[in-house]
């Protein structure tokens, strides 16, 4: 049986291990129910020897449409657009020190650590701006929605072995299977790494309605129209009686 020590670490993490990096999450399932207002998941672990810890949390990859607006006769209208694929639906990084102090740029690029190193693909016909302009626009949109974070979070060490960090998920967090990658860095390179899955899923009546709307869109539309018509009829009857 695992007992807790008051610092957010189970005693199992303290056991001797041949692996220089041991990681776990306080919760591997985030359940989204009616009234979900966001949550925080604790990541904790232990390391053998010296080194820094970098944590990368990615949501499922998505294809996004980014539109560029221009002002025409005083009105802002969609002028051009681009399709960006392989964009994480959610992205967070946390580190025990600033990334430029502990990781080589080549390592950041290889493991896609940090927003500037995400390998997203841009498809556009708009020749007036660059791929990077659309890419930066998507990053700004994601940041404003609370799904991306420009500044890394903090990985805190307690002693020389134990570490922890908190992963914040906003109320609008997308569902799916997330990957939580934890890197032990030494001399600017990856010394050890572990990947842990995290599932974010809708449950309850809201989940059933969502699945019905997604997989049977035509029937859902018909029921929605009938429900709206019935509500209007009942309101009209109540109004006449009043």
Image (cartoon, grey):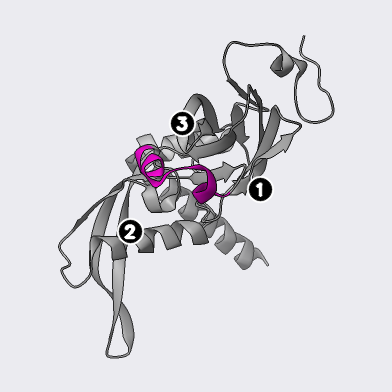
Give x and y (percent) for residue 117: 37, 48
Magenta stretch, residue numbers: 98-110
Q: What is the number of callouts on the image?
A: 3
Q: Is residue 122 visible?
A: yes
Q: From the image, tell me which residue sits under label 3.
A: 190
Disc 2 element: helix
Name the side, left or right, on which 222 lies relative to 82: right
Label pair 2/1, CB-CB below 8 angstroms: no
Residue 101 in magenta? yes
235 and 109: which one is in front?
Answer: 109
Q: Is 151 drawn above or below residue 80 in the view shown? A: above
Q: Quadrant of the C terminus?
A: bottom right
Per the rendering, the mark at residue 135 is 2
Give x and y (percent) for residue 214: 39, 39
Give x and y (percent) for residue 109: 36, 43
Disc 1 element: loop
Mark 2 or 1, which is nearer the eye?
2
145 and 43: which one is in front?
Answer: 43
Q: Earlier in the sequence, mark 2 or mark 3?
A: 2
Would you call the spot at circle 1 few (<14 residues within 10 Å), some (14-19), or many (20 or more)? few
Q: From the image, tell me which residue sits under label 1.
A: 37
State the CA–CA distance, disc 2 to disc 3. 27 Å
């Amino acid at each position: 049986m695992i007992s807790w020590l008051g610092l957010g670490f189970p005693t199992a993490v303290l056991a001797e291990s041949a692996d220089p990096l041991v990681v776990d999450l306080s919760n591997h399932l985030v359940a989204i129910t009616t009234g979900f207002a966001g949550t925080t998941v604790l990541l904790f672990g232990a390391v053998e020897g010296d080194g820094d810890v970098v944590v990368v949390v990615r949501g499922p990859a998505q294809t996004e449409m980014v539109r560029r607006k221009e002002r025409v006769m005083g009105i802002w209208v969609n002028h051009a657009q681009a399709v960006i694929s392989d964009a994480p639906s959610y992205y967070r990084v946390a580190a025990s020190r600033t990334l430029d102090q502990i990781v080589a740029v080549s390592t950041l690029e290889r493991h896609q650590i940090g927003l500037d190193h995400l390998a997203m693909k841009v498809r556009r016909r708009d020749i007036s701006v660059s791929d990077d302009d659309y890419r930066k626009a998507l990053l700004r949109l994601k940041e404003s929605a609370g799904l991306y974070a420009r500044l890394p979070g903090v990985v805190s060490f307690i002693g020389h072995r134990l570490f922890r960090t908190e992963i914040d998920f906003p109320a609008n967090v997308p569902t799916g299977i997330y990957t939580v990658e934890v890197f032990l860095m030494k001399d600017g390179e990856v010394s050890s790494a572990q990947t842990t899955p995290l599932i974010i899923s809708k449950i309850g009546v809201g989940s059933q309605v969502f699945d019905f709307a997604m997989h049977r869109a035509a029937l859902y539309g018909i029921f929605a129209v009938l429900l709206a018509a019935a509500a209007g009829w009942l309101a009209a009857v109540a109004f006449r009686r009043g």
